[in-house]
Image (spheres, rainbow, N blue to C red):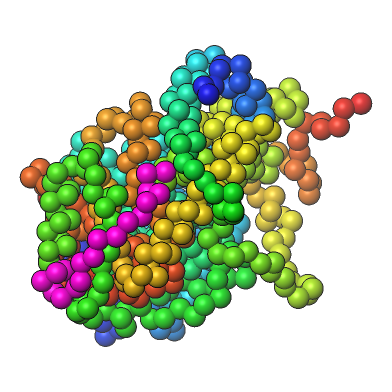
Amino acid sequence: MGIKEEKVRYLARLARIRLSDKEVNLFSRQLDDILAYVNKLNSLNIQKETLPLSHPHAPSNLHRADEFKPSIPAQTALKNAPQRKGDFFCVPKIIEN
Amino acid sequence: MVMDNLYSSTAAELLKPLRLKEISCADIVNSVYGRIEAVDNKIKAYVFLDKEKTARQIRDSSLENNDGKLKGIPVAIKDNICVEDERTTCSSKILKSFAPPYNATVIERLLMAGAIPMGKTNMDEFAFGSSCESSCYSPTLNPWDLERIPGGSSGGSAAAVAADEAIMALGSDTGGSIRQPAALCGVVGVKPTYGRVSRYGLIAFASSLDQIGPITKDVYDAALLMSVIAGFDEKDSTSVNIPVPDYTGFLKEDVRGIRLGIPKEYFIEGIDPEVERAVKDAIGLYRELGAQIIAVSLPHTDYAIAVYYIIATAEASSNLARFDGVQYGHRCEEPANILDMYERTRGEAFGDEVKRRIILGTHVLSSGYYDAYYLKAQKVRRLIKNDFDSVFESGIDCILTPTSPTPAFKLGEKSNNPLAMYLSDIFTISANLAGVPAISIPCGFTKNNLPVGMQLIGNFFEEEKLFKVAYTYEQKARWHKKKPQL
């Protein structure tokens, strides 16, 4: 199934990327081709018992001891801040009134 | 040793004169700088060189007292590996001013071994690519033919090593990004078993596929560098706690009785005939040297690219969500509100290929499509891994294939056709999906003097076997001694 321009705009909104009209048009065509290709997976008969593989090794929870260890100090973490105010990253207002 | 030509040496060749103080680390670094100055304006392998920092590291007294395996050896670093206080940009506008506040674990390991991380090499933006053309800087060019791409995404590292602009280098491999450029540039590249090398400090593309690995002039140097960077890291919960052998200790010229599997699915129409010829000649040489050549099958090979471009893009869309203008990197001017800030920051500073993959990844994970695409791809990924398990369980030691279906292609040849670009990863991708280790080594040249690489794929955590089998061929065939004319 192909991917229409309105779908690309919807996905761009989900992914928080502003696309130009030209980009929407280009990606819609290119993604059409790519999706047509990946649809070959539909031709494969997959047995019901086949488990999905998310990770090459058997996953297991890893824990560490609940001990205090030093981490990156606040001033270091703020070094790359596009905008900062004191010890805070500064961003546009998040919570609507 | 001739001081001027130190840049053309391997790390192994430099270690003894360094130890005997016949040469110094500064001598090597200066020789490499000279080479970079002479040729990098043509090749453009490096995006960043901090000469002052390197000079400080050399002067640092801790290097004097260090007797590590790589003491005094400079190592070029792909631009997606964090080096403290050094610009690390993933060749992307969105990170153009980013200087990480910490070292990646592999960098810490290099430093502990006395090595000098030197310079950042060019790459496809966020490692999305097979040609180094999607870098926000200019593309790196292939030292063997400056009208051709070096491969990607670790194109800068591979070109630097091939052109003797680096003694050795680190790259990263998610779908072939170490092995394919190594093949196209005539050098050695290794993708370790997933979990063998820590990913802490590697700016993530696809977390279940990424690995950092060596790109070097010969197999010995690759084994040496692997011995240094590999190992369990408690900061990477996907790293595996298995001891790291001294891989160089396994380098003997002996493949008698080694069972090499040749998968029929990798010798198909569409391979360049000169690539096929070179790899078949290599198989012939292995037979002469006493290896057993056995036909095998990896039946789900044909689905690997489809699986990869669903899983890798899905993981990438998640991993790149952090580039939002809040804590680091680019932020758009005067955002109207938070949504505007996210959308414009990312819209302005991500390149086309990055946007394309994020959109695709978002799609396959989105409600209504998750089962049809992502879940299905994960099941086929299981089948691909099972294919490898079956082959190795049948007694095969290593699988031998071409690394790339073609030699280096021309700049611009595939950049307008994303799907054609993706198909060039056909032989390397399955090893990432399964998590098994693989190495690419030179196995010949085309009539146009372009390198051809062959790939050996091993079982989980059997890198030592891969190194031995690769080394045996390399020492007989000696392709690694040929250098590009620059």
Towards the viewer: B283 or A41 = A41
When asked about the image quadrant of residue B173, the answer is bottom left
The verdict on residue B298 being magenta is yes
Q: Residue B77: percent from the left, percent from the top? A: 41, 57
Judged left or right of residue A37, residue B220 is left
Towards the viewer: A49 or B181 = A49
Q: Which residue is drawn at 56% across and 17% down?
A: A4
Q: Residue B460: percent from the left, percent from the top? A: 44, 69
For residue B77, say whether it is visible: no
Instruction: Report the magenta residues as a range.
Output: B286-303
Q: Residue B455: percent from the left, percent from the top? A: 28, 58
Judged left or right of residue B439, residue B38 is left
Q: Residue at x 66, y 67 (%)?
A: A60
**Quadrant housing the N terminus of chain B:** bottom left
When asked about the image quadrant of residue B245, the answer is bottom left
Q: Which residue is drawn at 26% across and 33% down?
A: B411
**Residue farthest toward the top in the current orientation of the protein:** A21
In the displayed structure, B297 sits above or below A14; it is below
**Residue farthest toward the left in the current orientation of the protein:** B447
In the displayed structure, B220 sits above or below B283; it is below
For residue B148, say whether it is visible: yes
